[in-house]
Image (spheres, rainbow, N blue to C red):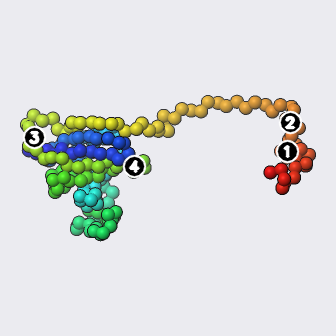
Amino acid sequence: MYYYKFRVYFDEVEDFVRDVEISASDNFESLHHLLYECIGLKGNEFAAFSICDPKWNKQKEITLLDTSDEDDLVDEEPEYDEEDQYSTKTRLPKFIMKDAILKDFISDPHQHILYEYDFMNPKTFYLELQKVAQTDNGADLPRCTYKAMELPVQLTAADVPEPEDVEFEDIDEEDDDLFDDNGFNDEDFSSLNEFTDF
């Protein structure tokens, strides 16, 4: 039996790296669980993998839940404009993580995969295949073998402390003559010239 070793990068944190190993016969749902545990994500948000070409153009999409309809089903590989390095294709072939076996999607010795997590507060991780090797019978897979740097801590609404009660001081009687029933006393502003005093 074989396993894959992937290196994981995250552009928003300098020197962020994770090395993960997973059996070639495992599915993308297992890889998803491994990633959110070793990266430090909550694991309760929507996520998707995209199988990419060497230029990181998306070729296939593998989602946690089935989000496709019949119009989304595409049999052929998407085509990209060779001249445009940012070329994208929206109608990608779609698969479900629990049904998608890793070895069926790995076609390049340095396969590129995007892992997109939490589409409301998006985080994109870049996976690159480092090696394919024979596994020992006693190997404990899947596993994280290397970690460097952590994600920044982000406050959620539940983490923000309640504001303290604010008490307003009463207006002094001396300042009270600035206001009349309409808000201000016109006499206090009658001497201002709108063109010279401002």
76 up-or-down from 143: above or below: below
* Mark sitting on residue 96: none
Q: CA distance from mark 3 to mark 2?
A: 84 Å
Tell me the element at label 3. loop
Coordinates of residue 142 in the picture (x, y in percent): 19, 39
Give the quadrant of residue 41: top left
**Mark 2 crowd level (few <14, some 14–19, many ≥20, 10 Å Cα):** few
Which residue was labeled with disc 4? 122
Which residue was labeled with disc 2? 176
Which residue was labeled with disc 1? 184
Circles 3, 2 touching at the beta carbon (< 8 Å): no
Amino acid type at circle 3 is Thr
Coordinates of residue 163 in the picture (x, y in percent): 59, 33
Front one among 18 and 22: 18
Coordinates of residue 165 in the picture (x, y in percent): 64, 30
Which residue was labeled with disc 3? 135
